[in-house]
Image (spheres, coloured by chain):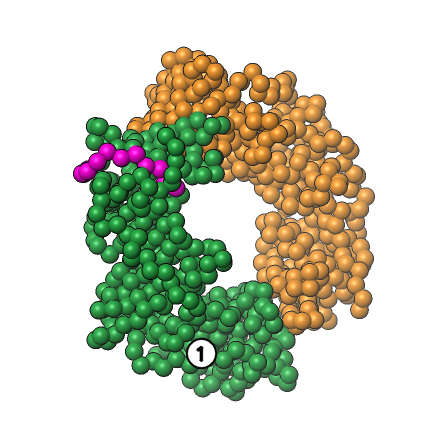
Chain colours: A green, B orange
């Protein structure tokens, strides 16, 4: 293998795939980036057991020459050092040459690097996915859907299935659900899909979705998604991102969502967020994060929290609309803040069915998001 | 105590003094900020055992009213919560009122806060410093002097005196020295001082100087420095910063600095820094950070590092001037990088007196900085 390649293009591709290389690999090859060179271009691949990312650099982009291939071939280079050294090379171009025993020479300006390369035959083989049917989601929408749900997934490995986000697809609607048993976030969107296409119980690790988010562009560029037996493939431009589907059956959460409310409030999102944020600062000192919400006779609500050592915070928030019974309820202020921060609507709807029943929070601008928080049982 | 005060001005002063409050106080009062209110203004004070910071907010700044004092008084409030809540208050102004038992009420917009205040009588008393003689140093110069020396101080508490920077003042020259026994950094500057004023063996903790740096403005504004028996006072605008002087005698470092060299190089700072940075990446994998420098017959130098598992980096750097013997030496690349990053000179002088003797690095633009690094003893 021998080629010269532009530093910037190689560096961009390395940055994308390196997210999938293990930082503490069980065997050295998993801490590597595989480089495959042919006369069409250079393919970089990194893989741990959960994620594989592949990025392709064509030899030219229109008139612009990116790489000149003298001899095709393959090698695996240790990711950590390779990622850092390439961006610091002195020249705009570098030469890579693989010699006997995968000994790799990198030359750039007055810099000469010898690297101990590994045998590409030992590198994990990527899953083969039949690309018969796929859905297309704009990049910015996919990022929003991830951001608006993944925070509610569990971080405890005791219930591995809940560390994922559940994906369901039916009647042209893609739905994400995440829950850690104390709260739930869901988001629905209409996406481009073949007529009658559907899937259910596709659960993808929250950590993986956060990694995916970083390589998805923040614009309308479509991401193609192919769901297979136990893998999902995301195509983002020249990048292929493979994720394992988590084993197990995701619990049915539809029954815990109340359909009727005893108290309904419409509140200004920003003012409520700021008030709960201040109450959170006090509640945090007690480690419980408990904040109380009490409806007032004058049509406002009072948010409060207290700490025996520090004191008390009391907030008044004006209500835009209120229907139903007066209410007194306590909840985890951190969970409420997490939810309020991802809702992009000037006003929010909050529905209560009693002090011990789930609280429902929804944007008033659109019907695509639904959030649920379980209240705290408190005395007084 | 009762007053109303502008949020921004109070917040700025809180941010300045809070750096001196203990995050894990031995007694609660040390985790507090003392507020003293009289008809001239508001004084905030925080103190741990090493540093005390005091900031004064006048009731008005020219025509601009900052605070309206209804009733003078004092209280100590827990720093952590107070620091965070003030900047998040909803209104531009807040009211603070201290009631019985130092119970403190803070009101701002629709927010009401009760805080458990502490008795100001229990707060540490600041050192009294006779302000007979002082020196004046422009803020940006003081910050440079700190940045160019403090990194070389020891971080090991086994030799407490070396965790400080040594200050000496004689003949209008202020000199800083820091060393951890493996390297040394020194910086001299001419400053405004009374005729014949001098001091020696004033050692100030590196951590303290980094804190001081954060409140010193990055311009020519003068910082007044008063050196007393076992304290140093820095006056930065409305802020007083007190630091303890470390106990003990700083070692005499003058004898270890060679005056004559067997090999002298003048090198381009940026190119040398980049080359050593790349060699450092490889040397870091071996945990030793060892980099070799070898002078070449063609008048350049070769910088190299190697790792048994990863490979080898070899760099050529052109020399601007070279006099003396050919040389082969090894040193800690991290120490060299730390030094090169603080030298603000396009070319640097590097002087060697042999493979086992101290390396001297100096800017070529001015004679005010001197750096020393001990080489490594290596085989081959």
Above or below, A86 against A343 in this view is: below
- Mark 1: secondary structure: loop
Q: Is there any visible trace of residue B77 in the rendered image?
A: yes
Q: Position of residue B320 (x, y in %)?
A: 65, 62
Location of mark 1 (residue): A127
Going by the image, does B148 lie left or right of B354? left
> What residue lies at 53% left-to-right and 82% top-to-bottom?
A74
Q: Is there any visible trace of residue A139 in the rendered image?
A: no
Give the position of the C terminus of chain B as an image quadrant: bottom right
In the figure, residue A191 lies in which quadrant? Answer: bottom left
> What residue lies at 47% left-to-right and 17% top-to-bottom?
B102
Magenta-span inclusion, residue B215: no
> What residue lies at 71% left-to-right and 28% top-to-bottom?
B199
Going by the image, does A78 lie left or right of B297? left
Q: Position of residue A23 (x, y in %)?
A: 56, 64
Going by the image, does B157 lie left or right of B144? right
Magenta-span inclusion, residue A327: yes
Examine the residues drawn in magenta and state their main secondary structure: strand
Q: Which residues are magenta?
A: A321-333
In the figure, residue B324 lies in which quadrant? Answer: bottom right
Q: Position of residue A81 (x, y in %)?
A: 58, 67
Above or below, A365 against B86 in this view is: below
> What residue lies at 69% left-to-right and 52% top-to-bottom?
B361
Subunit of label 1: A
Q: Position of residue B243 (x, y in %)?
A: 63, 29
Give the position of the N terminus of chain B as an image quadrant: top left
Q: Residues within 10 Å of mark 1 (few under 14, many from 20)?
A: some
Q: Nearer the viewer, residue A196 or B367?
A: A196
Q: Nearer the viewer, residue B95 or B218?
A: B95
Q: How many marks?
A: 1
């Amino acid at each position: 293998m021998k080629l010269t390649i532009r530093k910037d293009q190689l560096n961009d591709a390395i940055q994308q795939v390196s997210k999938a290389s293990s930082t503490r690999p069980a065997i050295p090859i998993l801490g590597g980036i595989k480089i495959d060179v042919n006369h069409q271009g250079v393919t970089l691949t990194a893989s741990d057991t959960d994620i594989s990312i592949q990025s392709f650099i064509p030899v030219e982009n229109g008139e612009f020459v990116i790489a000149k291939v003298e001899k095709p071939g393959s090698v695996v280079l240790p990711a950590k050092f390779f990622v850092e050294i390439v961006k610091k090379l002195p020249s705009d171009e570098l030469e890579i040459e693989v010699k006997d025993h995968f000994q790799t020479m990198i030359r750039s300006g007055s810099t000469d690097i010898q690297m101990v390369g590994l045998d590409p035959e030992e590198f994990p083989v990527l899953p083969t996915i039949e690309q018969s049917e796929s859905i297309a989601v704009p990049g910015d929408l996919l990022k929003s859907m991830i951001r608006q749900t993944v925070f509610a997934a569990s971080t405890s490995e005791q219930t591995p299935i809940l560390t994922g986000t559940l994906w369901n697809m039916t009647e042209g609607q893609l739905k994400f659900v995440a829950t850690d048993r104390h709260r739930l976030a869901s988001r629905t969107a209409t996406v481009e899909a073949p007529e009658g296409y559907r899937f259910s119980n596709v659960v993808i690790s929250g950590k993986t979705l956060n990694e995916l988010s970083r390589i998805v562009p923040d614009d309308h560029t479509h991401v193609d998604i192919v769901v297979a037996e136990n893998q999902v493939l995301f195509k983002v431009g020249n990048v292929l991102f493979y994720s394992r589907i988590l084993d197990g059956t995701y619990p049915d959460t539809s029954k815990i969502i109340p359909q009727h409310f005893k108290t309904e409030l419409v509140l200004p999102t920003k003012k409520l967020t700021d008030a709960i944020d201040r109450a959170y600062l006090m509640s945090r000192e007690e480690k419980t994060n408990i904040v109380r919400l009490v409806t007032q006779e004058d049509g406002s609500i009072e948010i409060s929290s207290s700490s025996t050592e520090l004191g008390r915070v009391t907030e008044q928030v004006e209500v835009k609309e209120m229907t139903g019974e007066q209410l007194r309820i306590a909840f985890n202020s951190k969970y409420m803040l997490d939810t309020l921060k991802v809702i992009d609507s000037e006003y929010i709807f909050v529905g209560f069915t009693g002090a011990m029943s789930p609280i429902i929070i929804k944007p008033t601008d659109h019907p695509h998001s639904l959030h649920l928080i379980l209240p705290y049982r408190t005395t007084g």
